């Protein structure tokens, strides 16, 4: 397991900020509204990973969690979450649907659209996070499966629920280095349960072609800082030709070079605002820009000012807002 937090060890005024910081940095960017006074607030988070599968076991007093439209728009790496209800109840809201979960039930939701999680009586839930590209289901299937209670009516629901609970409760799996080996069959089981829920077994067996664009974009994000990132390298990792790679991206309205440059520049812009002690050239290298002059010219072309000017303007605005 990677991190734990128990708010009982913190002073009441510090609890909300500590929770928000841990969740934003390690799980997902969401607004967290605690429904009890700070002295009564109690949250226990245990974070871990199982290969591509992220795990967050949570117990807490009454809380509402919201993924706002703004946070959803800022999503750079779409994820699908599975919420497994261990005890008590909760409500998952997304795409105009509400899933009311009881013990053993689960539901999925994705981070590219707004959602709400309602825990009026407290939280006893384990959250599983899967990159959408790794889940490898079509976008329409993810949308149709979101905020739908998966329980007794699904033949695979009980098996999936018990398996996921055992996965989290057995420390020998997550702490013993066996997590990566368990990740693939775990994600395949989740995919199968969602396929059964949607009544279309084909999407569980044949998802790869329909999600190739999403997997390519996930690959680009993962290698964005690599100065050697190229169409040939990406095509080789996906066992396709460069020509076919460009055709897939074109269907999504994406040109390889433009997408890489835009997202690298956005990464440098974010880092220039937060990494105060890191030089501009070092920030540029972090995002795959090896030529400082070229980077400065590209940054000015995109944002109308040099990197140093933007950093200074951002810091002045931040100080004025205090």
Image: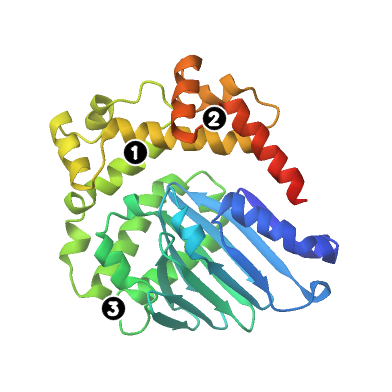
Query: Viewer-nearest of labels 3 and 2?
Result: 2
Labelled disc at residue 219: 1
Residue annotated with mark 2: 305
> Looking at the picture, does residue 83 appear above or below residue 277?
below
Question: Position of 159 compared to 39: left or right?
Answer: left
Question: Position of 58 compared to 243: left or right?
Answer: right
The residue sitting at 58% across, 35% down in the picture is 271
Gap between marks 3 and 2 measured at Cα: 58 Å
Query: Viewer-nearest of labels 1 and 2?
Result: 2
User: Who comes first in sequence, dot 1 or dot 3?
Assistant: 3
The residue sitting at 27% across, 26% down in the picture is 233
Question: Position of 317 compared to 305: left or right?
Answer: right
Q: Nearer the viewer, residue 148 or 162?
A: 148
User: Who comes first in sequence, dot 1 or dot 2?
Assistant: 1
User: Who comes first in sequence, dot 3 or dot 2?
Assistant: 3
- Provide the secondary structure element on which disc 3 rests: loop
Q: Nearer the viewer, residue 114 or 182?
A: 114
Position of residue 7 measured from the top left corner of the image (x, y, whole percent): 76, 63
The residue sitting at 32% across, 50% down in the picture is 133
Regarding residue 223, the answer to whether it shows in the image is no
């Amino acid at each position: 397991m990677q991190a734990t937090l128990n708010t009982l060890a913190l002073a009441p005024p510090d609890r909300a900020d500590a929770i928000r910081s841990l969740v934003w940095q390690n799980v997902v960017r969401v607004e967290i509204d605690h429904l009890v006074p700070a002295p009564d607030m109690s949250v226990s988070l245990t974070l871990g990973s199982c290969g591509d599968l992220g795990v967050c076991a949570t117990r807490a007093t009454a809380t509402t969690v919201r993924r706002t439209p703004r946070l959803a728009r800022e999503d750079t790496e779409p994820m699908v979450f599975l919420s497994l209800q261990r005890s008590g109840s909760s409500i998952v809201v997304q795409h105009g649907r509400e899933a009311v979960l009881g013990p053993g039930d689960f539901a999925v939701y994705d981070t590219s659209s707004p959602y709400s999680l309602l825990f009026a009586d407290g939280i006893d839930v384990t959250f599983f996070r899967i990159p959408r590209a790794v889940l490898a289901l079509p976008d329409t299937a993810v949308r149709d499966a979101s905020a739908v209670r998966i329980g007794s009516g699904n033949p695979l629901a009980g098996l999936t629920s018990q398996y996921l609970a055992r996965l989290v409760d057995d420390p020998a799996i997550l702490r013993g280095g066996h997590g990566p080996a368990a990740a693939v069959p775990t994600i395949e089981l989740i995919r199968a349960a969602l396929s059964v829920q949607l009544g279309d077994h084909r999407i569980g067996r044949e998802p790869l072609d329909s999600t190739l664009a999403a997997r390519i974009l996930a690959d680009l994000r993962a290698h964005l800082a690599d100065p050697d990132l190229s169409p040939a390298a990406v095509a080789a990792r996906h066992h396709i030709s460069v020509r076919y790679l460009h055709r897939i991206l074109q269907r999504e309205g994406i040109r390889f070079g433009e997408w890489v440059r835009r997202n690298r520049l956005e990464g440098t812009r974010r880092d220039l605002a937060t990494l105060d002690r890191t030089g501009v050239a070092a920030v540029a290298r972090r995002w795959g820009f090896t030529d400082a002059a070229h980077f400065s010219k590209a940054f000015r072309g995109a944002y109308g000012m040099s990197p140093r000017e933007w950093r200074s303007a951002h810091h002045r605005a931040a100080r004025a807002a205090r």
